[in-house]
Image (tube, rainbow, N blue to C red):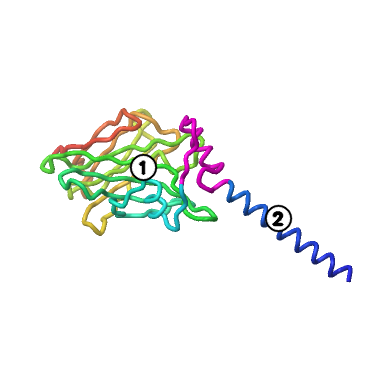
Amino acid sequence: MKTTRRWGMAAGVILASVAVLYLLLYMYERPGGWSDQRMSRSLGMNQSLQIPLGSSPEEAVRLFRESDSMTVVHEETVGRGKLVFLTGSGDQDRSNLQVEYVRKTWIGWKWVWGAGYGMDGDPTVSAMNYMRLPELEQISTPFPMVFGEVLDPSIQQIIVQQKQTGTDKSEAKLIKTAQGRTIWFAFQAATAGVPFEIEGLDQAGKIIATKVITDVRGSGTMDSSK
């Protein structure tokens, strides 16, 4: 009888501990919870964000951005989260691309950080475009990262390299989307800053486009040097 009572008490303690743990996780992740308050402080906001939870990465982005006009063209798994690449359905003469980072929680997917660009470009001279997403202080993200779209099909490789040291070099990942576009992205070291150089090369290693970036949040187009 005493043994049964002990087992019952142990099971009760375990269930209570699980309930407390779940409550703490909920208080942390719920819209307006501790994680949102931490994000708000990092951004210097006086009021707390109310970041909704989604059942999928796409839904998490859609709920936060309050928009259904974006099309997901690629999702990339990064640690416990995903990068969601989206394009707008607006002016077809403008090149646009957006990247959102969402993370997996115990109670759903939650938006963390992201940005995008929309820019005009002459397709006869523009070889590629780019944008840099810096890291967010005190918030865990895969940034800094440089991303964009390849406009010149002869570009088969993209290298991002720190200009001062020349040692911090990363090769971008190129992805052909179902919509026929080629997007690219490259992660940078947390210590990476500006200036850095982006090079677009053909299959033989010839430089098709190159540009030195001096703005930590810069975006723009790169013309062909052919």
Q: Residue at x 47, y 39 (%)?
A: 49
Q: Which tag is nearer the camera, tag 2 or tag 1?
A: 2
Name the spot of residue 14 as percent of width and height, x first.
73, 59
| Residue that carries the numbered disc 1 in the rendered image | 170
Name the spot of residue 198 as percent of width and height, x first.
28, 37
Image marks 2 and 1: residues in contact by CB distance under 8 Å: no
The stretch of residues the image draws in magenta is 28-51
Residue 88 among magenta residues: no
Residue 17: which numbered mark, if any?
A: 2
User: In what element is the residue under mark 2?
Assistant: helix
Quarter of the figure with the C terminus? top left
User: In what element is the residue under mark 1?
Assistant: strand
Indicate left or right for 93 with 61 as reference. left
Residue 104: which numbered mark, if any?
A: none
Q: Residue at x 43, y 36 (%)?
A: 135
CA separation in Å, label 2 and label 1: 45 Å
Residue 38 among magenta residues: yes
Indicate left or right for 49 with 92 as reference. right
Q: Residue most toward the bottom?
A: 1
Q: Residue at x 24, y 35 (%)?
A: 220
